[in-house]
């Protein structure tokens, strides 16, 4: 009798539980229709890379080739990510609630595809919500929309876990999950005014928003530019030209990709900045965003200050230039020790085209030793940069044969096969080779003395070496005990 009573009691309890569950489903439907509450961590494999990490690898501005991207994608395809972004849309139609678009910078960058068991979660989110989401990397695009994630789930909405939201709704608590609307400029943008000197974005980031390949309308670009105009940046690029512009304002063109991408406006009285650098110098510069062009020439920068030429601080370069040369002799010593007077060709004077005589070898190479050429174009010569530019035309694209010491060598994916060569101190020459010379180049070691040929392409700067292309090694004298 007791057993029968307990059995009946158990059945009634089960019926009561099922009725309560059905009532809850009906009361909160369609909010929880098809919704499967998160059940903790998934056993799937997660990658540690952030969205920005993968954007650098697979984005439009990646340096990888299409085939290299495909190889890299094999490492990530099918693996899970946990990222944070802003909801840009949910569903493409009112009846399509199995997808959501997520923005990390501009427009939609990730599309989430939810399974039937997670379909109800789309009802919990709104455009502008900041969410923490997971999903399986399933498809790679080559545009602003970069990734498609299947088996998606949302864990946190505006700082509140989905479990908490559902619990509060079930209890009848009014939930105000305030959307975290932010400018489309960047999900990481600081809403407060940046500190003086704080970087806003890299050149690549600005070009992504305002460049000619941006998908943003011109009117929207102008609105966004109002936010950035006057802000301080610090970028690094290569000098493509320098000149006096309108109203005697100095202008320096900077190349970040192809052609001139940024124009630096140099204030009157700061002409020494123009004098200090030359074409093809790699410089680090600061300034304030001035005018938007939105073409290959992206923008102009004012209040410019050049921090580095190559890897040397400008203050250090100026100090070196102002210090008396330790190798220079005084007038008294020259009288007493005439044997150390510099040769005429070594004197720091203005040299004219008609003053130089270039002779060639039988095989068409010019007979100008490195020391003689460097006396004309090196740091010790007091000619102006424009005077050196004019004189360099007599040497540019001519072939030479010199002997120097290997300072470095290697092959880069972008920079190619190169060798640094020492003649006096440091790297004086950068010699560029074609790929068929790889075994020859990599067969040398630091400290080896080589005789080489090459075509003069770029003269030296304050720091940067001479650049020679079409390099070849004629002979190698191995350094005793040379190592890598």
Image (cartoon, grey):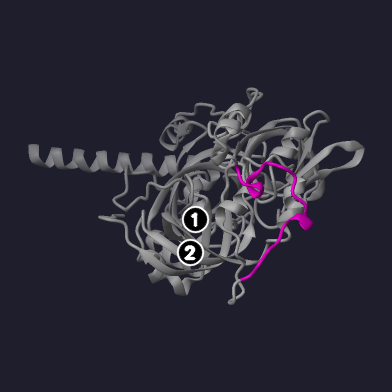
The answer to whether any part of residue 456 appears in the image is: yes
Task: Measuring from the top left, give residue 25's x and y in whole percent.
Answer: 44, 44
Task: Measuring from the top left, give residue 96's x and y in whole percent.
Answer: 58, 57
Which image quadrant is residue 353 in?
bottom right
Q: Quadrant of the C terminus?
A: bottom left
Alpha carbon separation for disc pair 2 and 1: 7 Å
Q: Is 413 displayed left or right of 444 in the figure? A: right
Task: Tell me if residue 347 is in the magenta stretch.
Answer: yes
> Callout 1: few (<14), some (14-19), or many (20+) C-alpha neighbours within 10 Å?
some
At x 32%, y 61%, the residue is: 478
The majority secondary structure of the magenta stretch comes to loop
Q: Is 305 displayed left or right of 104 in the figure? A: right
Which image quadrant is residue 449 in?
bottom left
> Where are the magenta residues, as a range?
342-360
Q: Does residue 204 sit above or below 226 in this rendering?
A: below
SS label for mark 1? helix
Q: Does residue 149 sit above or below 424 in this rendering?
A: below
Out of 299 and 242, give the one closest to the viewer: 242
Q: Is 299 displayed left or right of 53 in the figure? A: right
At x 75%, y 45%, the residue is: 350
Q: Which numbered circle lies on residue 69? A: 2
> Disc 2 or 1, which lies upstream in sequence?
1
SS label for mark 2? helix
Q: Which numbered circle lies on residue 314? A: none
Q: Which numbered circle lies on residue 57? A: 1
Task: Tell me if residue 455 is in the magenta stretch.
Answer: no
Q: Are marks 2 and 1 in contact (CB under 8 Å)?
A: yes
Out of 179 and 299, give the one closest to the viewer: 299
At x 58%, y 47%, the residue is: 464
Q: Does residue 32 sit above or below 471 in this rendering?
A: above
Out of 193 and 388, give the one closest to the viewer: 388
């Amino acid at each position: 009798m007791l057993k029968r009573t307990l059995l009946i009691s158990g059945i009634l309890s089960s019926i009561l539980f099922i009725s309560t569950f059905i009532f809850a489903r009906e009361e909160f439907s369609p909010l929880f229709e098809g919704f499967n509450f998160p059940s903790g961590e998934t056993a799937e494999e997660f990658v540690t890379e952030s969205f920005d990490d993968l954007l650098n690898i697979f984005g439009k501005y990646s340096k990888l080739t299409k085939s290299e991207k495909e190889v890299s994608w094999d490492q990530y395809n099918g693996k899970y990510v946990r990222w944070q972004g802003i909801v840009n849309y949910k569903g493409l139609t009112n009846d399509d609630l199995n997808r959501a678009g997520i923005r990390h910078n501009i427009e939609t960058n990730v599309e989430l595809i939810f399974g039937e068991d997670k379909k109800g979660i789309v009802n919990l989110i709104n455009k502008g919500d900041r969410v923490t989401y997971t999903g399986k990397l399933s498809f790679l695009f080559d545009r602003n929309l970069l990734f498609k994630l299947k088996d998606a789930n949302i864990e946190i909405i505006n700082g509140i876990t989905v479990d908490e939201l559902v619990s509060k709704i079930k209890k009848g608590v009014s939930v105000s999950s305030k959307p975290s609307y932010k400018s489309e400029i960047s999900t990481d943008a600081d809403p407060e005014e940046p500190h003086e000197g704080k970087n806003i974005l890299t050149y690549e980031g600005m070009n992504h928003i305002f460049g000619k390949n941006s998908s943003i309308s011109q009117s929207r670009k102008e609105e966004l530019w109002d936010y950035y105009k006057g802000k301080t940046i610090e970028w690094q690029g290569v000098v493509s030209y320098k000149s006096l512009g309108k109203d005697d304002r100095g202008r320096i063109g900077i190349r970040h990709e192809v052609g001139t991408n940024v124009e630096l406006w140099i204030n009157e009285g700061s002409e020494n900045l123009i004098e200090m650098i030359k074409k093809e110098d790699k410089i680090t510069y600061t300034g304030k965003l001035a005018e938007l062009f939105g073409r290959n020439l992206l923008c102009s920068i004012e209040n410019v200050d050049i921090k580095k030429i190559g890897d040397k601080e400008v203050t250090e370069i100026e100090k070196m230039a102002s210090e008396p040369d330790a190798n220079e002799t005084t007038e008294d010593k020259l009288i007493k020790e005439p044997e150390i007077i510099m040769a005429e060709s070594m004197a720091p004077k203005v040299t004219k085209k008609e003053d130089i005589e270039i002779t060639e070898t039988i095989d068409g190479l010019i007979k100008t030793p490195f020391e003689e050429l460097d006396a004309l174009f090196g740091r010790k010569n007091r000619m102006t940069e424009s005077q050196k530019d004019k004189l360099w035309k007599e040497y540019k694209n001519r072939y030479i044969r010199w002997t120097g010491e290997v300072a470095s060598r290697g092959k880069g994916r972008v920079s190619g096969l190169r060798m640094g060569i020492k003649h006096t101190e440091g790297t004086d020459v950068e010699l560029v080779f074609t790929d068929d010379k790889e075994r020859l180049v990599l067969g040398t070691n630091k400290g080896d003395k080589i005789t080489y040929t090459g075509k003069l392409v770029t003269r030296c700067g304050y720091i940067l070496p001479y650049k020679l292309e079409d390099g070849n090694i004629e002979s190698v004298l191995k350094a005793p005990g040379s190592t890598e």
